Image (cartoon, rainbow, N blue to C red):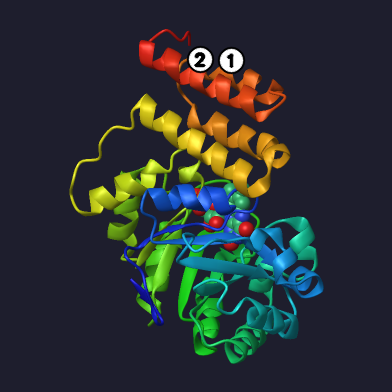
């Protein structure tokens, strides 16, 4: 897939997810071959106030490429200034028009922009003027069931210079309930002259293949399906080549979870890692015998060595077939 001048090695993307897709998580996704990963959403206002080097969410390293940087905001001039600041920091810039969180929406940013198409036009035009690189917008279907306007908003964004559109086909009112309506992705693909990326409810390789088949979208974005399951990316890449995926062994799970933990210690420090890795480690063992006991240990662990020991014990027991459900 090509977005403006950015050639991607494949069309599997890691979704921007606040509180999840930090540098260590992106590096894990890259280990499994993801074609493009995004930062968590970054406040354009905050970026201007604090400066690029003090925004932890923008921390990256050369191996963390290609990288999409996602900004949120409501003021065209502020977003344009922020876009100028991040130019060259990553490989692509995305503007968040889908975040349903109250605090964000109240300021007129995120999915509130779906209610103000004229503002979308002003924002994309201003950002387009400020930067020359690949520019995308990430939309929801609309604000609510009565105002499904993704086609209108997407057309406006493209007319003002967006190079591709990402659609999570749920309304803001739906938040994450129900199912993503992939028919809307198909509609968008049929309507736009630029690449369309589908986001929503890809939890296994078969889902990804079905999204491609049913919508003809150009790229597949994986969000929650990657939780504790980064090999979904590899599985999907293999499935696209009609090749079977190797089962993920307990040994591989342990090695990946351990690397994720170590990367988080390295890049975020042990105190942060202890908190951040609780959820990830619980996701890595989800559905496996002994997961409930492990969850308690992880939440009670006082330091990183304790976490590592719990992880090793868990997987050793799984390998020996000793764990109790
Ligand atoms: C915890 C969480 C945080 C998210 N943060 C962002 C974000 O910062 N920016 C964004 O555009 N979308 C965000 N999303 C939405 C995802 O990018 C994605 O569009 C959505 O989860 C649907 O895809 P999925 O079903 O594969 O998870 C977030 C979703 C979750 C679950």
Report which quarter residue 316 is drawn in. Answer: top left
Q: On the rendered image, what quadrant is the N terminus found in?
A: bottom left
Q: Is residue 242 left or right of residue 40?
A: left
Which mark is drawn over residue 290?
Answer: 2
Q: Which residue is mark 1?
A: 293
Query: As displayed, is residue 243 above or below residue 193?
Result: above
x and y percentages locating residue 17 in the rendered image: 59, 54
Residue 144 appears in the figure: no
- Asked if the beta carbon under badge 2 is closer than 8 A to the nearest atom of ligand 1, the reply is no
x and y percentages locating residue 239 in the rendered image: 24, 48
CA–CA distance in space, label 1 to label 2: 6 Å
Residue 142 appears in the figure: yes
Q: Is residue 125 left or right of residue 225?
A: right
Residue lying furthest left: 242
Considering depth in this image, is 29 or 201 the residue closer to the camera? 29
x and y percentages locating residue 5 in the rendered image: 39, 82
Q: Is residue 174 left or right of residue 54?
A: left
Report which quarter residue 95 is drawn in. Answer: bottom right
Q: Residues within 10 Å of mark 2 (few under 14, many from 20)?
A: some
x and y percentages locating residue 212 in the rendered image: 31, 59
């Amino acid at each position: 897939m090509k977005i403006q001048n950015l050639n991607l090695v494949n069309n599997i993307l890691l979704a921007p997810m606040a509180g999840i897709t930090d540098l260590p998580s992106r590096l894990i996704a890259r280990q499994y071959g993801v074609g493009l990963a995004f930062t968590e959403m970054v406040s354009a206002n905050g970026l201007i106030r604090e400066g690029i080097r003090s925004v932890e969410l923008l921390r990256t390293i050369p191996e963390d490429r290609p990288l999409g940087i996602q900004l949120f905001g409501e003021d065209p001039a502020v977003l344009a200034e922020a876009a100028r600041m991040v130019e060259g920091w990553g490989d692509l810039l995305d503007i968040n028009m889908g975040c349903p969180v109250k605090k964000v929406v109240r300021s007129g940013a995120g999915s509130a922009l779906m209610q103000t198409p004229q503002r979308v036009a002003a924002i994309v035009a201003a950002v387009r003027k400020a930067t020359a690189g690949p520019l995308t917008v990430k939309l929801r279907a609309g604000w609510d069931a009565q105002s499904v306007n993704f086609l209108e908003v997407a057309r406006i964004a493209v007319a003002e210079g967006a190079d591709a559109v990402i659609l999570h086909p749920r309304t803001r009112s739906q938040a994450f309930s129900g199912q993503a309506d992939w028919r809307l992705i198909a509609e968008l693909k049929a309507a736009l002259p630029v690449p369309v990326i589908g986001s929503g409810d890809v939890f296994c390789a078969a889902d990804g293949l079905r999204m491609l088949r049913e919508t003809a979208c150009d790229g597949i974005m994986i969000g929650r399906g990657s939780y504790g399951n980064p090999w979904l990316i590899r599985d999907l890449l293999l499935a696209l080549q009609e090749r079977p995926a190797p089962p993920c062994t307990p040994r591989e799970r342990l090695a990946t979870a351990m690397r994720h933990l170590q990367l988080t210690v390295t890049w975020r420090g042990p105190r942060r890692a202890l908190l951040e890795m609780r959820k990830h480690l619980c996701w890595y063992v989800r559905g496996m015998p002994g997961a409930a006991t492990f969850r308690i240990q992880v939440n009670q662990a006082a330091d990183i060595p304790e976490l590592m020991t719990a992880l090793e014990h868990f997987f050793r027991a799984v390998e020996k077939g000793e764990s109790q459900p």
